[in-house]
C-alpha cells in the first residue's frame, strides 16, 4: 500500500492539484500527534450552509486550527451504516434538493482553505453518476479520494482503475469482525489510509470509546505495518480523541459535528456555527495533548 504524497494535475481548466490524504497524517505525525478527520454532509442545512460549515471545520473564521482532513458526506436515501443523527441531516439535505454534483463544490470549498478532502459515499451514487466521470470530476475539484463503506476491494475493479487513472486515494473499511485475510487484502487495495470501524453497528456518538478499537488497530499493524489507520464510529469529545490517537494514526468524528448543526437549526439559527466550533476546539485540543 502506498502512503506517500502523490501530486497529479487532472485534465480540465478548473483542475486543482490532487494531494494524497496521507499527507494529512504525515503532517500531524511531524507534530508528534495523531490526525483529526472531520465529517459533514453536503447539503445540510442547505448547500451554501454546508459549504460554510465545512470551511469552519477547517478552522476558517475561527480562533484556532481545524481538522487535518475533511470527509465530505454525500447524502443517500438508504444510508445503512449511518446512525440517526447523520440520517436526519442527510434526509433533510435530500428533501432540500441536494444533488450528487454538489459534492464537488463542497470539495472545492474545503480545498480553498488548504485542507485536503475525501468524499464519503455509498457506491450506488458513484455508479449512477458514472465511475470514470465521478473520478474525473472529483480530481478536477481537488479531492484526494473516496471512502466507500459498502464497496469491498473484491468488487471494486472499475473504481481501482479509475482511481489509478486520476491519482485518487482509495479508503476501504475493516471492522472487529474482519478476518486476518480480509485485513491483509483490504490493506493491499487501499491507497492513502485505512478506515477502522471501532464498533459493530451504525455511526453515532458514544459515552466511551470502543474497547475493540485498540485490538483491531494492533491487528492491522501486525498484518500491514506500513498502513495508516484512522478509527471512526463513536468519538465525540477531546478526551476520546486523545485516547484513540494514542494508538491509531487518526481519529474520525462525524455525528458530534452534525449534532451541533441539528441543534442550531432546532434553535432557529441554522447558520450559527458556534456549537460546531466549540466541539471542534475540544477535539483539536484533544489530539494535541
Image (cartoon, grey):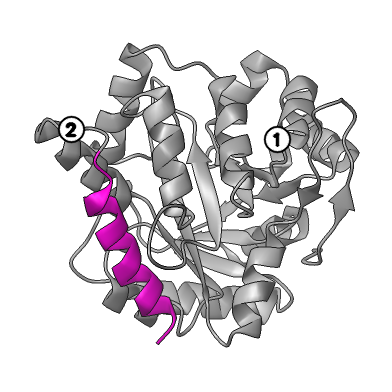
The foreground one among 199 and 62 is: 62
Which stretch appears magenta? Answer: 272-289
| Residue 223 screen position, x and y as percent | 68, 75
Gap in angstroms between the C-alphas marked 2 and 1: 39 Å
Circle 1 sits in a helix, a strand or a loop, which is it? Answer: helix
| Residue 198 screen position, x and y as percent | 40, 64
Tell me, yes or no, whether the highlighted magenta stretch contains residue 90.
Answer: no
The foreground one among 228 and 42 is: 42
- Which image quadrant: the C terminus? bottom left
- Which image quadrant: the N terminus? bottom right
| Residue 214 screen position, x and y as percent | 43, 79
Instruction: Name the residue rendered at 59%, 84% in the picture.
Output: 31
Instruction: Name the residue rendered at 87%, 35% in the picture.
Output: 10
Instruction: Determine the residue located farthest toward the left in the rendered image.
Output: 267
- Quarter of the image where one finds residue 233: bottom left
Instruction: Name the residue rendered at 89%, 46% in the picture.
Output: 8
Amino acid at each position: 500500500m502506498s502512503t506517500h504524497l502523490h501530486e497529479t494535475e487532472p485534465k480540465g481548466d478548473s483542475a486543482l492539484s490532487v494531494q494524497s490524504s496521507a499527507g494529512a497524517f504525515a503532517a500531524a505525525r511531524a507534530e508528534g500527534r495523531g490526525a483529526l478527520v472531520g465529517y459533514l454532509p453536503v447539503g445540510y442545512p442547505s448547500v451554501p450552509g454546508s459549504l460554510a460549515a465545512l470551511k469552519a471545520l477547517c478552522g476558517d473564521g475561527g480562533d484556532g486550527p481545524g481538522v487535518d482532513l475533511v470527509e465530505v458526506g454525500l447524502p443517500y436515501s438508504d444510508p445503512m451504516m449511518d446512525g440517526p443523527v447523520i440520517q436526519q441531516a442527510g434526509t433533510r439535505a435530500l428533501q432540500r434538493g441536494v444533488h450528487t454534483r454538489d459534492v464537488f463544490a463542497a470539495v472545492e470549498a474545503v480545498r480553498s482553505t488548504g485542507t485536503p478532502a475525501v468524499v464519503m459515499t455509498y457506491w450506488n451514487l458513484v455508479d449512477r453518476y458514472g465511475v470514470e466521470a465521478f473520478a474525473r470530476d472529483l480530481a478536477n475539484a481537488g479531492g484526494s479520494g473516496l471512502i466507500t463503506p459498502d464497496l469491498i476491494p473484491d468488487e471494486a475493479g472499475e473504481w481501482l482503475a479509475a482511481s489509478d487513472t486520476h491519482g485518487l486515494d482509495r479508503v476501504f473499511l475493516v471492522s472487529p469482525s474482519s478476518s486476518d485475510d480480509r485485513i491483509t487484502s483490504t490493506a493491499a487495495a487501499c491507497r492513502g489510509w485505512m478506515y477502522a470501524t471501532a464498533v459493530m453497528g451504525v455511526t453515532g456518538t458514544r459515552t466511551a470509546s470502543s474497547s475493540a478499537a485498540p485490538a483491531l488497530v494492533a491487528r492491522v499493524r501486525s498484518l500491514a505495518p506500513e498502513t495508516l489507520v484512522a478509527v471512526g464510529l463513536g468519538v465525540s469529545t477531546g478526551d476520546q480523541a486523545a485516547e484513540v490517537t494514542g494508538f491509531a494514526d487518526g481519529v474520525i468524528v462525524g455525528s458530534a459535528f452534525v449534532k451541533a448543526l441539528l441543534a442550531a437549526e432546532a434553535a432557529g439559527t441554522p447558520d450559527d456555527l458556534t456549537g460546531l466550533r466549540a466541539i471542534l476546539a475540544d477535539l483539536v485540543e484533544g489530539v494535541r495533548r
